[in-house]
Image (tube, grey):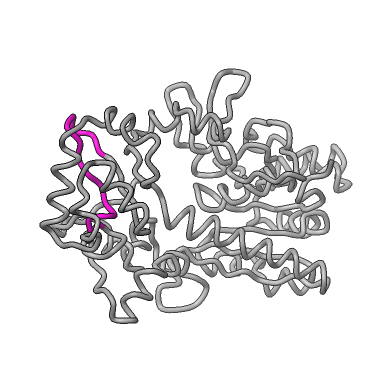
Amino acid sequence: MGRALDGVGVLDLTMNLPGPYMTWLLAELGAEVLKVENPQGGDYARALTLESGASPVFEAVNRKKKSLALNLKEPAGREIFLKLLDRYDVLVEGFRPGVMTGLGLDYAAVGALRPRVIYVSISGYGQGGPYRLRGGHDLNYLSLAGVIGLTGTRAGELAVPGIQIADLAAGSLMSMAGLLAALYQREKTGQGQFVDAAMYDGSFALTVISFCTMMAGLEKPAPGRTMLTGGYPFYGLYRTKDGRHMSLGAVEFKFWSNFCLAVGRPDLVAKQFGGPEVIEEVTRVFAGRTQAEWIEFLKDVDACCEPVLTMEEAVASELARARGLVDQRADGRRFVAPPLKLSGSPRPEDAPPPRLGQHTREILAGLGYSEGDLTSLSERGVI
């Protein structure tokens, strides 16, 4: 049985997290992903090592890929790169706008030579606009998009999110959606296109509910003050007797009613949208049992109430095991498994992340370069 992206070749020039995470998902769907890395160090994430020499972040998002060490600043390197586009007609890069132009490998140049190429640029603030050349990281994009301004306590204390929302949701997944749409369109038209994926744009788009309710005049977005940030008793985090927490997400009335009746508080059923005094009542209810007691008490109650787990507990949970969310290699090391489950697209066999330049000679030999050519290119610092 074939895989969803069999036959799709991807040149991956990205580093660190957003781009490599996205191209790892493509590899898991069957695409052949070739990392094109600077011979001097390669992907920056390679340097984020432990005492053992392993780079856990790099290994997590670069499995099932190949690596070509190629100096794109050299004319011979650019020549090789253009030849590769005959076999790998999807290109993903994550540099600041202008970097690829300086190399003579921007979409205008590449697309003119290879009209079928799908060229994905993942950047902080996009290819146009006043911030296009500005540096940034996940927390900056979320801050400017209004996400951090929504994240925190009822007392107004803001919080740093526990995962990289802008990098992964707004960057990796949004760019992947654009890429897959472009692949589908190319099947019909034969033409490639440019995908401008900005982590700031994606973060802004993720505010859709708060944006809509604000524009409709229903709520003034603020941490802990709106419907889905803890402003009402039916949706929030509550401390238990042992200092742990439970999450209550009883948005629909039936779930709220089920919860109130289960805990013996029918008087609260009509107060789903009550204010601070009702929140305080629910707080006292949760404080009456430990987290373990709440898990047992609510196991058969349809109320959208679940424990807040630590990362260690989440990894070890029966739910994570049942859903196959952790890959374990033969050497015992564990990694996050891809969340995509396609009934007609089996996963590729496991393969560890590549060493820097591990596949350089194999790839170039496939392009027709002789052993003598490879020796010369190596001596000149091209590979």
Query: Within the magenta stretch, is there residue 140?
Result: no
Residue 12 at x, y percent in the picture: 65, 52
Residue shown at 25%/38% (left/top)?
Answer: 245
- Above or below, 56 against 81 in this view is above
The image quadrant where one finds the C terminus is top right
Name the foreground residue: 177 vs 381: 177
Residue shown at 26%/70% (left/top)?
Answer: 221
Query: Within the magenta stretch, is there residue 244?
Result: yes
Q: Pick out the residue farthest to the bottom.
A: 216
Q: Quadrant of residue 219?
A: bottom left
Residue 176 at x, y percent in the picture: 61, 58
Residue 116 at x, y percent in the picture: 79, 68
Please indicate whether residue 50 sits to the left or right of residue 238 in the image: right
Q: Which residues are magenta?
A: 230-245
**Prevailing SS of the magenta stretch:** loop
Please indicate whether residue 37 sits to the left or right of residue 203 in the image: right
Residue 103 at x, y percent in the picture: 62, 64
